[in-house]
Amino acid sequence: MPDKRGTGRPLVQNAYVFDAYFKDGTKIKIAVDQEFGSKEAAEQDASRYGAPLGKLPPLYRNIIRHITVNFGGSDTTAFAEDKGHFFTIYSGNASKRIDTHDLEETFFHEGTHASIQAAYLESPDWKSAVSRDGSYITKYASSSEQEDFAESALFAYTIIHHPDRIPDGDREKIKDMIPNRIEFFRRVFSGELKLQTGSTDGA
């Protein structure tokens, strides 16, 4: 149960653990902080996360091992472990993001880090796409290679699978800014660009 708030709590501790099952046969464990105080309270919180997990690409759910949910932390943002294939959220921050309809976006962003990032971040295909595009889709994307990867994946997936959710003018602008990244993720999501051998060992 990692916690970046610096609370001094041990990394390994008791938690309420639930299994979320999806119609495509995938399963993700949800480990909920013992500070919720009871199985019933923990299960009520865990139930909020099944739908966002279910909307992730099946590829992601095949790789993500689990998520951890820390109690509270309304202003503490989620984070992911790419090689461990999991991500951590905070219940208070999740509540805020549900209110602003941002939780699914958070799950996709952190899910990208936790699933496919380890396999592709250092790949020649990805680095070539970044070099050829020569721009970043958001200011946050320009902050690091990892954030560029996750931010670009979100925009690319929306352009590929849900283009109607982006206004026409913005959609064309995105296509002009990161065309090679979009093509890269099209190949990843379609299975044309295979995962590197061993990148999901144990997933």
Image: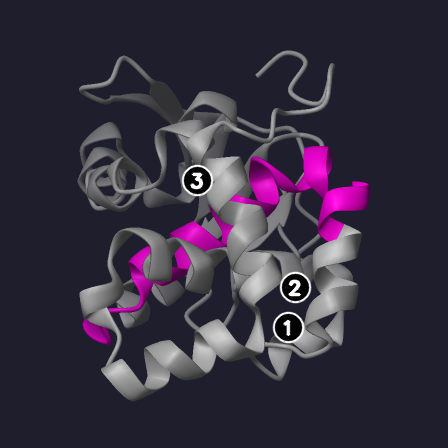
Is 92 positioned to the left or the right of 174 in the image?
A: left
Is 71 positioned to the left or the right of 54 in the image?
A: right
SS under mark 1:
helix
Q: Dot 1: few (<14), some (14–19), or many (≥20) neighbours within 10 Å? A: some
Mark positioned earlier in the residue sequence (1 or 2): 1
> How far is the residue under mark 3 from the one under mark 1?
30 Å
Q: Up-down: is 39 above or below 172?
A: above
Q: Up-down: is 23 above or below 70?
A: above
Q: Nearer the viewer, residue 128 or 162?
A: 128
- The question of residue 117 being in magenta is answered with yes
- The question of residue 82 being in magenta is answered with no
Is 158 positioned to the left or the right of 201 in the image?
A: left
To which residue does mark 2 refer? Answer: 147
Seen at 33% across and 43% down, the residue is: 36
To which residue does mark 3 refer? Answer: 33
Corner quadrant of residue 132: bottom right
Residue 164 lies, in percent from the top left, at 18, 67
Disc 1 residue type (three-letter): Ala
Q: Which residues are magenta?
A: 99-126
Residue 71 seen in the current view: no
To which residue does mark 1 refer? Answer: 141
Q: Are marks 3 and 2 in contact (CB under 8 Å)?
A: no
SS under mark 2:
helix
